[in-house]
Image (cartoon, rainbow, N blue to C red):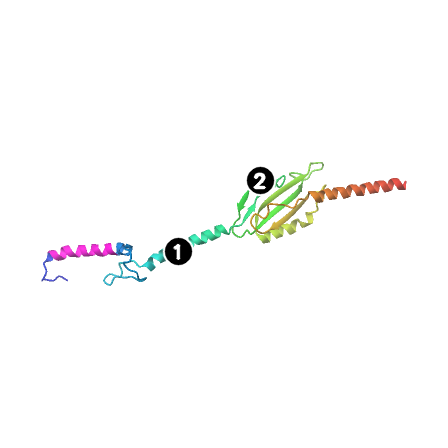
Amino acid sequence: VYDSHYPLPIYVVFVPFAGFGCVYASFHLHRIPNFCPATNCTLPSFPFLLRTREMEYSNVLPLVVVLLIGLVGECSAHECYVCSNQTGNTEKCLNTVKICQQGEDACLTEIRWGSTPYFSLGAQKQFYVSKRCAKKEICQRIRTKHMPYCTHIWYEDWTCSACCLGDRCNYYVISAAPTTMLSTLLATLAAFGVLLRSIMSS
């Protein structure tokens, strides 16, 4: 309200400077050390212009929470060795590591014995090793599916699967070579026994 006791130029000069001072205070007074040691700090005349410490914390807190969640997720990520149809548990199967997707909490290893791409009479057989990330339920399902075909018979095609839990737990695979050698030895001994018996009986 205009007061006739003061000249008009005083209002014209004072009001803009007062407004500028209030805005300047609202942006800079909170930066002065020990200006307001209390947690809830307001100016009696202009409480809406001074940003309180709670407002600053409330703006920063969501960002801190998001960063912490990201760090925890990264630290807890599951890792497995991965490879596909390698001719042994060497090189790529021992040097390639993958960070599994969310929910993939197991490492799956598949060992196949046979010819490639499909079985053919007289074709050379060899091992094929594959490793990857998988969910525990899916890994167990694949293992159960391959169980009837996990025969380790050297003259047949077979596939075995194994599941494990833990970071990089599928570094080693259970080699079927000893079992294959044992099967071959037993078959040879059985054939030799039959031949020897037929010779003695004649």
Residue at (49% x, 51% y) in the render: 75
Residue segment shown in magenta: 9-25
How many angstroms separate mark 1 from mark 2 (CA)?
42 Å
N-term-proximal mark, 1 vs 2: 1
Image location (x, y in percent) of residue 153: 72, 44
Residue 10 included in the magenta stretch of the image: yes
Residue at (65% x, 40% y) in the render: 127
Residue at (89% x, 41% y) in the render: 200
Task: Name the chief secondary structure element in magenta.
Answer: helix
Image location (x, y in percent) of residue 118: 66, 39
- Residue type, numbered disc 1: Pro
| Relative to 102, 58 lies left or right | left
| Relative to 160, 188 lies left or right | right
- Secondary structure under the numbered disc 2 in the rendered image: helix
Q: Front-most of 118 and 172?
A: 172
Dot 2 alpha-carbon crowd within 10 angstroms: few under 14, some 14 to 19, many 20 or more: some
Q: Is residue 140 above or below residue 155?
A: below
For residue 97, the mark is none
Residue marked by disc 1: 62
- Secondary structure under the numbered disc 1 in the rendered image: helix
Residue marked by disc 2: 92
The picture quadrant where one finds residue 35 is: bottom left
Locate the C terminus and report the quarter of the image it occupies.
Answer: top right
| Relative to 84, 47 lies left or right | left
Residue at (53% x, 45% y) in the render: 98
Image location (x, y in percent) of residue 82: 57, 44
Image location (x, y in percent) of residue 129: 62, 42
- Residue type, numbered disc 2: Lys
Residue 23 included in the magenta stretch of the image: yes
C-beta proximity under 8 Å, tags 1 and 2: no
